[in-house]
Image (spheres, coloured by chain):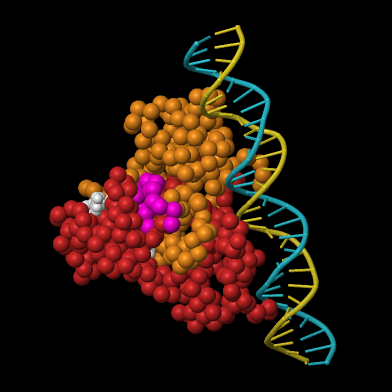
Chain colours: A orange, B red, C yellow, D cyan
Amino acid sequence: MERVISIPKPTLERLPLYYRRLLQWREEKVSIVSSADIGKNLGIDSAQVRRDLTYFGAVGRPGIGYKVEELISYLGELLGINNVNEAIIVGVGNLGRAICSYPGFAPYGLSIVAFFDIDPQIVGTKIRGHEVFHVNDLIHIVKRLKIQIGIITVPAREAQKVADQMVAGGIRAIWNFAPTRLHVPEEVIIRSEDLAVGLATLSHYLVREDLSERAEGLDRGISGS
Amino acid sequence: MERVISIPKPTLERLPLYYRRLLQWREEKVSIVSSADIGKNLGIDSAQVRRDLTYFGAVGRPGIGYKVEELISYLGELLGINNVNEAIIVGVGNLGRAICSYPGFAPYGLSIVAFFDIDPQIVGTKIRGHEVFHVNDLIHIVKRLKIQIGIITVPAREAQKVADQMVAGGIRAIWNFAPTRLHVPEEVIIRSEDLAVGLATLSHYLVREDLSERAEGLDRGISGS
DNA sequence: TAGTATTCGTGATAATTTTCACAAATGCTA
DNA sequence: TAGCATTTGTGAAAATTATCACGAATACTA
Ligand SMILES: NC(=O)c1ccc[n+]([C@@H]2O[C@H](COP(=O)([O-])OP(=O)(O)OC[C@H]3O[C@@H](n4cnc5c(N)ncnc54)[C@H](O)[C@@H]3O)[C@@H](O)[C@H]2O)c1
Ligand SMILES: NC(=O)c1ccc[n+]([C@@H]2O[C@H](COP(=O)([O-])OP(=O)(O)OC[C@H]3O[C@@H](n4cnc5c(N)ncnc54)[C@H](O)[C@@H]3O)[C@@H](O)[C@H]2O)c1
């Protein structure tokens, strides 16, 4: 249980932020950045940045910094986003449609290749040129296409049922937006996004007039300045 | 800088989860729960739950547990969601509309009372019976209504501009969905939701066939089982 | 070439968060 | 009332994460 050096969870949450900023720098033809540059840009301590980057192959040069291109490549590899990750989405409602139409996930390797719903009004319509299938066909299609990632954007009470179907189809990772805890076999990975958490913490900090103490976290956190 | 006992950040992220589950229990007429009940339901260690609950007034009774009603009340107070928090949203595109139409934030006190966009095709249309205003009117309206919370769902390159306007209007807390770092005065609270982080961590765990080691975090985390 | 200014990598330390484990409180039963 | 089963609250220990601080590596300049 202590065999391989794994990446600390907080680090793992920062890496995608580095990745995004690095893509920008590449656009801007910046080829070298220092840990201080990265840190200043993202509000993260530079020592933290260096530490984070040592958890995988990244090597910088003293006095110089890190090669943008190299970091992008390493990060892409580590995050599994150099190659395209095909996914399906279940629940083409308000949130589901927003996610489907969002181009911002493409740089992270996401490609949604099939869409499912249960509403007869929605099944059969087209999203980005693709037909929306009935959720009853989910298992079959997922198996045939060997999809590994499933996105759940159905109401909470339906989420477990959908997760079960995904698992039955062989899906290995679930990105869940329904505010409920899902039970899946141990080998299936779940990431739940719970936006209400963000809202509640925001409102908490607001209610404490007590401004003297506010957290500083950046990525997920609350911050002034 | 160490004056008041403040709530640890990880705890603060768990409290909304407790809150949601407690609302459910109340629905189901459950009046008492133990830390073990809460923990089992949310995949959190029961000692952790107890510890979390001690950070604010919550008091349980040995041998019995905690009163659901009481916890809800305490949590609602602490999270600032007992009273309604009025907010505005800027950017009524795909994500903005999804958020506006979502009823799931109401239990967390959110009430979106004004909608803004810049697109002439969108300005003047109605959302839930309310007219969408032009973003130029933002400062004025925010001041008049004394709004404290602003939600940003515009493209990243526009986000800073919008944030500046919010600040100028007197907004004290910003819930930001644009994938960019915002710079605001120190007294303004920012919470950024970055969905790409979730996607990237999911894909990272997927790429490590190395299943032997996966994290266990629940709320924001990755978990099997 | 020597001197200067950067910036990395990292051991050591500090701070934070989680988990353990147990005394004390409570209710139930006989 | 005594004994038993629960469950809380919390010190103390463990684990994790962040920060400090400095030697070594590198480029640049004169
Ligand atoms: N909209 C938001 O801003 C928001 C924010 C946070 C969380 N969420 C969560 O995301 C999920 C979706 O939210 P939404 O606003 O898009 O809801 P929605 O009602 O607009 O969409 C849900 C869609 O799922 C479909 N559906 C229902 N049961 C299904 C099933 N068994 N199989 C397949 N499809 C099914 C419905 O037909 C509908 O199209 C919910 O769990 C919600 O709590 C939404
Ligand atoms: N859609 C998603 O699933 C998703 C996921 C994660 C993050 N985001 C982020 O959320 C934001 C919105 O995404 P979206 O998909 O809704 O985009 P969108 O293009 O559908 O909507 C953006 C809206 O903002 C409006 N707008 C642009 N500039 C404005 C300004 N200066 N003032 C007021 N309104 C303005 C546009 O007219 C449009 O209606 C983006 O920053 C995006 O990166 C979206």
What percent of the width, then of the height, locates residue A162? 40, 60
Query: Which residue: 59% across, 42% down?
Result: A6
Q: How many marks?
A: 0
Query: Is B175 contained in the magenta span?
Result: yes
Q: Indicate the position of residue B119 as horizontal and vertical percent values.
A: 18, 53
In the rendered image, residue B35, in percent from the top left (x then y), is placed at 61, 71
Q: Determine whether A128 is above or below A76 in the image.
A: below
- Residue A204, given in percent of the width and then of the height, sits at 47, 65
In the displayed structure image, the side of residue A207 where residue B214 appears, left or right: right
Q: Relative to B190, is A62 above or below?
A: above
Q: Residue at x 55, y 55 (%)?
A: B217
Assign the magenta stretch its main secondary structure. loop
- Where on the picture, by quarter, is residue A86? top left
Query: Is residue B164 highlighted in magenta?
Result: no
Q: Is residue C4 rendered to the left or right of residue A177?
A: right
Residue A205 in the figure: left or right of residue B32: left
Residue at the spot 22% in from the left edge and 48% down from the top edge: A129
In the picture, which quadrant includes the C terminus of chain B?
A: bottom right
Q: Look at the image and tell me whether residue B169 can be seen.
A: yes
- On the rendered image, what quadrant is the N terminus of chain B found in? bottom right
Bounds of the magenta segment: B174-187
A151 relative to A158, above or below: above
Could you tell me if residue A162 is visible in this image? Answer: no
Position of residue B106 in the picture relative to residue B128 (left or right): right
Instruction: From the viewer's side, name the closer residue of A98 and B95.
Output: B95
At 55% from the left edge and 68% from the top edge, which residue is drawn? B41
Which residue is more in the foreground, A69 or B84? B84
